[in-house]
Image (cartoon, helix red, strand yellow):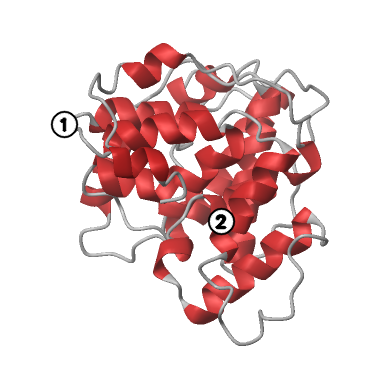
Amino acid sequence: MRIWDINPGYLNRQSLLGEHRELHGIISIIANGKYGYSRHPETIRWIGHDWALAKRHKQLACEMALRKFTDKSPVISCENDGTWPTTYIDEPDRQFQLLKEKYIYKEKGRISLPKNEQQLWSQHKYSVLARDPNIYKDIGRHVSVIKGDFPELALLLVELLRCPPTEGGIRNAIQHMWGYVADIPGSKNFEIHSCSLHRLLMETQKMAIVTNEPYITGSTALSELMSWLPDIVPVNTKLGVTQLKIENLSHSAPSEAESQNPST
């Protein structure tokens, strides 16, 4: 039994659909007081976190939709406390290693498993931009000059992506992503500044997949931002992520080029 904490885009088809089934199993055990697997560590860590289970399910469903699977079993939670489990069965960096071992001779996920901090950051950057542009800039500066902090960065990114993005943040991130497909035939007449967030993200998904644009098809934001659209928060909401965690990645000064180009 496994509910992954890293983005569902890293899971292959079998793992993605498998987690979807197991998540429903955990919900049934918790909601109905079933005995089977009730003392499993994975079940125990989700007790009292109905909202987070529903959100994880939505993230899975949005990734499934991106891969043309249909979710016919929505999960609805009456709670809205926004809290996630504080424990992990395996830390996020270990989860990446487990998938690397698991997928040696198997189909891979939509997003390539990261080989280093720089690749991990490039895959998450637009998801982070949707949450807080200042955190986005800080992490970008640190990652450009550090090596060997993959475990800390992996944990920080998992926790950041559990925070709700703002409406303005989502639009900003998608518009950055749209820049990679804006010159493709069929996208010229699309007005990105006046359409709904849902349509903007749908069009970005469509154009990225049609053209197989590697930087965007390999982004966590391509599916996970969709899971937050009905739940977006006011623009002035602050994230509950401490600056200390970002500073712990590195104490090196940012390069001039990196500080002047926050969109890369």
> Dot 2 surroundings within 10 Å: few (below 14), some, or many (20 or more)?
some
The answer to whether any part of residue 38 appears in the image is no
- Determine which residue is flagged by label 2: 176
Which of the labelled discs sits on residue 79, or is there none?
Answer: none
User: How many dots with numbers?
Assistant: 2
Q: Secondary structure at mark 2?
A: helix
Q: Upstream in the sequence, badge 1 or badge 2?
A: 1
Q: Which residue is mark 1?
A: 148
> How far is mark 1 from mark 2, CA to CA?
28 Å
Whole-percent x, y for residue 172 in the image: 64, 48
Residue type highlighted by circle 1: Gly
Name which residue lies at 60% across and 21% down. Answer: 239
Residue 110 shown left or right of residue 83 in the figure: left
CB atoms at circles 1 and 2 under 8 Å apart? Answer: no
Q: Quadrant of the N terminus?
A: top left
Q: Is residue 181 above or below residue 4?
A: below
Q: Nearer the viewer, mark 1 or mark 2?
A: 2
Seen as rendered, the residue at the extreme bottom is: 185
Q: Position of residue 42 (x, y in %)?
A: 47, 26
Is 235 left or right of 95, judged from the image as shown?
A: right
Q: Answer above or below: position of 208 versus 95.
A: below
SS class, disc 1: loop
Q: Which one is nearer the viewer's eye here, 85 or 163?
A: 163
Residue beneath the point at 40% across and 42% down: 260
x, y percentage for residue 261? 41, 47
| Callout 2 amino acid | His
Task: Describe residue 160's horizontal placement relative to residue 163 as left or right.
Answer: left
Q: Is residue 49 visible?
A: yes
At 77% across and 22% down in the image, what residue appears? 80
